[in-house]
Image (tube, helix red, strand yellow):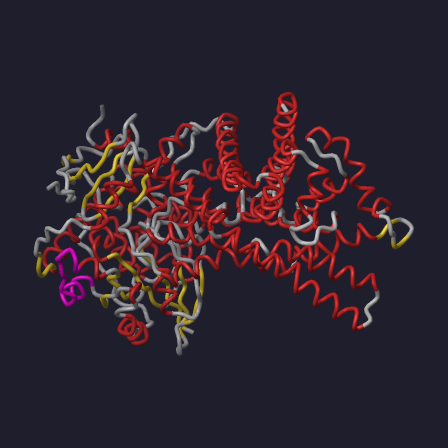
Amino acid sequence: MMQLNYVEPSHPTVIVHQMTQLDNSTASRLHNLGIRPGSELTVLRKYPFHGPVIIEFDAQRIGIRYTVFTALLGGD
Amino acid sequence: MTVVALLGNPNTGKTTLFNELTDNYSYVGNWEGVTVEKKVGKIHHSEMMVVDLPGIYSLNPITKDEAVAVNCLLHDSPDIILNVTNACQLKRNLLLSIELLEFGQPTVIALNMIDDLKRSGIAYNLGILSAKLGCRFCTTNARNKEGLEQLKADLLNSPTQATEPLALNYPSDVMNSLDVASMQLVQQFNYTETFARWLTIQFMNQNHQVRQFAADKHLHPLLNQAICYDQQDYESQIFNTRFDFINEVLSDATEQQSLTNKANITAKIDYWITQPLLGLPIFVGIFYLMFKLSFDWLGTPLSGLLDSFISGPVSHTASALLTQLGAIPFLKSLIVDGVIAGVGGVLTFIPQIFILFACISLLEDSGYMSRAALVTDRLMQMFGMNGKSFIPLIIGFGCNVTGIMAARTIEQPKERLVTTLISPFISCSARLPIYGLFVAAFFQKNQALIVLSLYFLGIVVALLMAKVYQWLFKIKESSVFIVELPKYHLPRLDIIAAGTWDKGKGFIKNAGSIIFAGTVLIWLLSNLGPQGVVTNINDSFCAWIGQAALPIFQLIGVTSWATVSALLTGVLAKEVISSSMIVLFHLSGQTGLIATFSTLFTPLSAYCILIFILLYAPCFSTLSAIKTETGSIKWAAYSLISNTVIAFVIAMVVYQVGSLFM
């Protein structure tokens, strides 16, 4: 018999390398959410065509833009 | 009277708590930025005022609504601060708490949503938290009314005098500069030491509003050092000290941490809702269901019942009663053919409007809205906007005025302006009655589809205009888009009912005031002429005005002056168009409608009229909201003219091109 149970998919994690490439408002908002260099982020979902990225950290989920995401990882 | 300020991160349940603590009802939703203005209420059986403020991430405001909260602290100096936090996300919530504790007013910290924390298997020792941070802690679950009595007792027992502020061990450079600057502030400007230190830390932290405050008050000890502070990056040093302090406090205070393997419900739902490929179709599907429910399945049958009640028993009884009382025919006609037919005709749309609002409230309370912002962001980016602009636009379905207010949560001023300018194109509830009249007469089989097409046209025009403004204002600044995805809530009936009422009450209130006035006005204009009371409506003032503008409107398929007069009254409020039409065409409710309309319009011209009504001049309330939010009457005047021109051009093109084929 087939089981249709939901299985928590495993997600990759990344480490924030730097926040200097971001504009001030974005950087300070991410600071306020508790992200700083060294923070570990779980990447839950990436949308195609460089769409938004959903990340999870400290029991919270937020959506950010692809450019911000790559900037956090240290540029292209 | 003691004033309690409710401060905390967005979407931590401040407004729910406010509603439970006070006599007031405020509008609640499960997304960041529900509260954009401050609201005041009184705690039951006490002399304590509570001020509900917009959510803030820190005391350094980025958006306009956040500035409201910081201003309250700077200028209104509340007696007690109630800091509401999301217990699951205590780490980042405490970043704000530290800033508040440094301010030195008595503070109570509520760990809200404590049930979510328990479910995740973590517990905090309140005694340790209390000792480390130097303030009272209590746990609440505002949605289920738990812990409220304890919180109320804590607030009533709290001292109202300034207490010892929290003093963190910042790096020695920062500390030395802090000592020097704050001492000078105390000596030269007579500030208390606590306030001087708080001001200096905030100034070092590049708080825009505090820097502005310092410039306004000529606080030289700070202004002279600004460059030095920034060069040595005091901001990061302060941030890191706070962050390390929080980590230390939390690891001391965490009592148990049992790992739970249960996949939580939010993860399950999100797995489907935010699928890259399914996200947008699900979004469109949800809206299609909403419209089906409002117009086909439930709303229209109910509306039919209400209509037969008003145009039948109510109208007949009033008529008989007036004849019995010996009212003069003029007065009787004004009441029966004017007020009851006109206002009553608009009121029959209550079922559709309230069902639509109930659906929107359900989406808001559940937490879907921020997912909608996320899945639409990529699309909105193509028009130079961001997903967050989508929420004000959806709120605009209820009323454009509240939609424009909701735009305050958008970070960039220019994006906010663009969102404000395109908001009136969104089809608000007041336009529903007139759609209802026309679809009932011409599009019986496809009611939901025709109405949905108008809603979509409104969105498309809004987005295209956004693109135009983008180009006109030369907007290049990259937009900030960071959206929190809150945990889903099981919708609560009373919150949905209250939210529906909150959105819909304006419609009913309007029926009693502006629609009533507009109906009486149009009745008088159509029954009076240059020679006094007229028996032939073609000699009335109304006919004169309508005839004068008719040649222009013929281009979009309008053939009768009465339609033109009805359209002109729409600037008062959009609902007035339908009541005017009912009065001018002597329609008794919706029954005589099909017969009358089929001689005046074709399906094509009917659709063109609807397009024109969708897009033309915003109503007075919306114009005044545009004026308030942009701070200039020019933008209101601009909207009035440009929207009418755009509406006319689009309706004309559709009519002229359509005529070639039909």
Magenta stretch in the rendered image: B118-133
* Res B348 → quadrant: bottom right
Residue B648 spot, x, y in % from top left: 65, 31
The quadrant of the image that shows the N terminus of chain A is top left
* Type of secondary structure dominating the magenta stretch: helix
Work out which residue is located at the far right of the displayed protein and give it: B531
Q: Nearer the viewer, residue B444 or B476?
A: B444
Q: Is residue B197 visible?
A: no
Residue A14 image position (x, y, % from top left): 15, 34
How far from the left and from the top, in percent, is residue A61? Answer: 24, 44
Q: Which residue corresponds to the image point at 40% horizontal and 52% vertical from the top-left?
A: B34
The answer to whether residue B582 is left or right of residue B329 is: left
Extreme residue toward the bottom, this view = B45
B438 drawn magenta: no
When asked about the image quadrant of residue B617, the answer is top right
Q: Residue at position x 45%, y 29% from top?
A: B475
Left or right placement of residue B174 versus residue B401 in this view: left
Question: Quick check: can you spot residue B168?
Answer: yes
Residue B600 is left or right of residue A50, and the answer is right
- Image-quadrant location for residue B100: bottom left
**Residue B560 pos. (x, y %):** 76, 38
Note whether B285 is above or below B660 in the view shown: below
Q: Relative to B314, does residue B561 appear above or below in the rendering?
A: above
> In the rendered view, would you say A18 is above or below B15?
above
Name the foreground residue: B610 vs B478: B610
Q: Is residue B126 magenta?
A: yes
- Give the residue at x 21% y 65%: B134
Image-based side of B99 in relation to B212, left or right: left
Q: Could you tell me which quadrant the C terminus of chain A lies in?
A: top left
